[in-house]
Image (tube, helix red, strand yellow):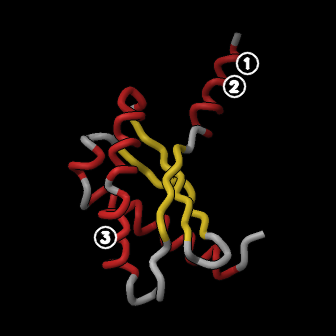
Amino acid sequence: MDSTRQKKIGRLLQKEMGEIFQREVRDVVKGTMVSVTVARVASDMGVAKIFLSIFPTEHKDEVFKNIKQHSSQLRFLLGKRVGKQLRVIPELQFFIDDSLDYAERIDDLLKD
């Protein structure tokens, strides 16, 4: 169960990472739309799990691999934005959020 502080920091990280992906790292995402669906922070505030939704899905694996390679640059950019609010900038772990693909697949199965 997440504490209130973890939820607040998660929302802050979700908002800021979304803006970073939209405005600052266009060379990393290579013309795809990357949105941050969920950001969960560990209880010690040392690790943040960032769940990403990547559209269009044709180059999803390539873009995700590129994001993971540039995770230190993304953490640095995040630190510049939230450095005054957080004492320690959490280590970022990225995951693909495939809940939209899963829901679409279920809809397709129900239509048949």
Where 55 sits versus 105, above or below? below
The residue that disc 1 covers is: 110
Disc number for residue 106? 2
Name the mark nearer the viewer: 2 or 1.
2
Give, as a three-letter code, the residue at label 1.
Answer: Leu
Determine contact: label 2, label 1, CB under 8 Å. Answer: yes
**Could you say whether the residue bearing mark 3 is in a helix, strand or loop?**
helix
Choose the circle earlier in sequence order: 2 or 3. 3
The residue that disc 3 covers is: 77
Quarter of the image with the N terminus is bottom right
From the viewer's perspective, tell me whether residue 103 is left or right of residue 69. Answer: right
Q: Residue furthest left?
A: 27
Residue 8 location in percent, x, y? 59, 77
Query: Label 1: few (<14), some or many (≥20) within 10 Å?
Result: few
Give, as a three-letter code, the residue at label 3.
Answer: Leu
Residue 100 falls in image quadrant: top right
From the viewer's perspective, tell me whether residue 81 is left or right of residue 106. Answer: left
Q: CA distance from mark 3 to mark 1?
A: 43 Å
